[in-house]
Image: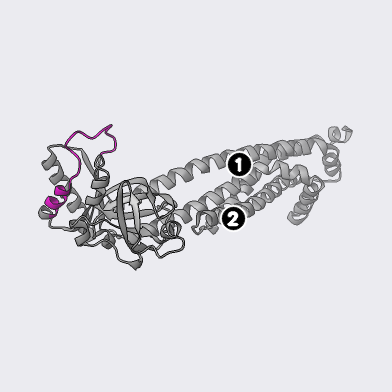
Amino acid sequence: MNLGESIRVAWDSIRANMLRSILTTLGIMIGIAAVIAVVAVGQGGQQSIMKEMEQFGSNLFYITVDWRRDELPTGKEFTMQDIEIIKANVPELEYLLPCAQTYSTIKGRNKSKTAQILGTEADYARLHPLKITAGRFLNNSDCQGKRRVVVIDEELAQELFPRDNALGKRIVIGNQALVVCGLLKAENSMFSMGTKVIYIPTRVWLDIYPNGGISYIEGGTRSPEDVKTAMQSSIKVLEKRHHSEDLYQGMDMEQEIQAVNKVTGVMTLVIGIIAGFSLLVGGIGVMNIMLVSVTERTREIGLRMALGARRRDILIQFLIEAIVLCLLGGIIGMTLGIGGAFLISALAKWPPLVSWTTVLLAFTFSATIGIVFGILPANQAANLDPIEALRRD
């Protein structure tokens, strides 16, 4: 029996028990679909994150209090004076600004919404890709003079003032009324997670929230090569001013990218392992159904042997049947995986990266499962005694 005839016989056998065959390969379908979808969505998400992070530039860094501490010792908080002293002592810096943040309710004319309130300085717009659609961003006069002005997201402005232009209108944060001086284009970033952000001068933020404090310090250098030097020098100034070592920690964009790659890599690995177990279960199912098939077709095997089929022919026939069965599950799984990747990516709003290398690998892997888990049933069929096989009912 040649290869083509073996494949035809295998397909006829599978088609005769199509429902049983599909159920048998369910584990392989799920495993292959999961592997393709996870890799595609993971790579697409990772690329989207990298693109968004590249928009911030590679010359940025952040300084925060070490989050591993249960609480910040008294007198060690960031201050506005820290900012001025760091600027004066670190020549590599081009920008340095405080950022104070909290979530709070803001009130418009007749509506209230929850948003992130970010207290910052005028240079924030130079470090971030903000797009002003009307009015202006905060300027140095606003920040130094503690003017009660605010820049808000245009979608949030539409929600608060559905019938009016929000520019020049007043909103209330805490017990303070602030005038809208600028509108920003709505962010569709994955980092925003749908949260609306409004910007006010840092000193105004500290007046509204006297029990709060500066959350982190953000800096920018003239050259990406100066980032680590500027960050370390800034931390040393803080440690000297606050008489504390190992209290402050910095992170630059390169470290953030590495952290993102590590997280996405771990998630992909975990889900890949789960998918691997599905493939293992699917392989065991294939082996089980092939053993059943050998038992059901004992007389057929005996008859083939009596007509001159060699043991090798029987072995190849059942091995090919197991491979075709697994490839059937692999093809369905690949279809589901690619479709699932596009669906998840559409919901998450980032492009899927369907790697044809991954698809080919999944296809090869499903064939390998057929070989590995089909050897035992095929070998059992090939080793049947033709006389005993013909006696079976």
Residue 77 falls within the magenta-colored stretch: yes
Amino acid type at image mark 1: Leu
Foreground pick, 359 / 173? 173
> Which numbered disc covers residue 287?
none
In the picture shown, does residue 99 fall above or below 390? Answer: below
Q: Earlier in the sequence, mark 1 or mark 2?
A: 1
The span picked out in magenta is: 66-87
Residue bearing mark 1: 279
- Residue 36 relative to residue 125: left or right: right
Residue 386 falls within the magenta-colored stretch: no
Where in the figure is residue 134, as x and y percent of width and height? 35, 68
Where in the figure is residue 215, as x and y percent of width and height? 27, 45
Of helix, strand and loop, which one carries label 1? helix
Foreground pick, 351 / 11? 351
Where in the figure is residue 99, as x and y percent of width and height? 26, 50
Where in the figure is residue 126, as x and y percent of width and height? 26, 62
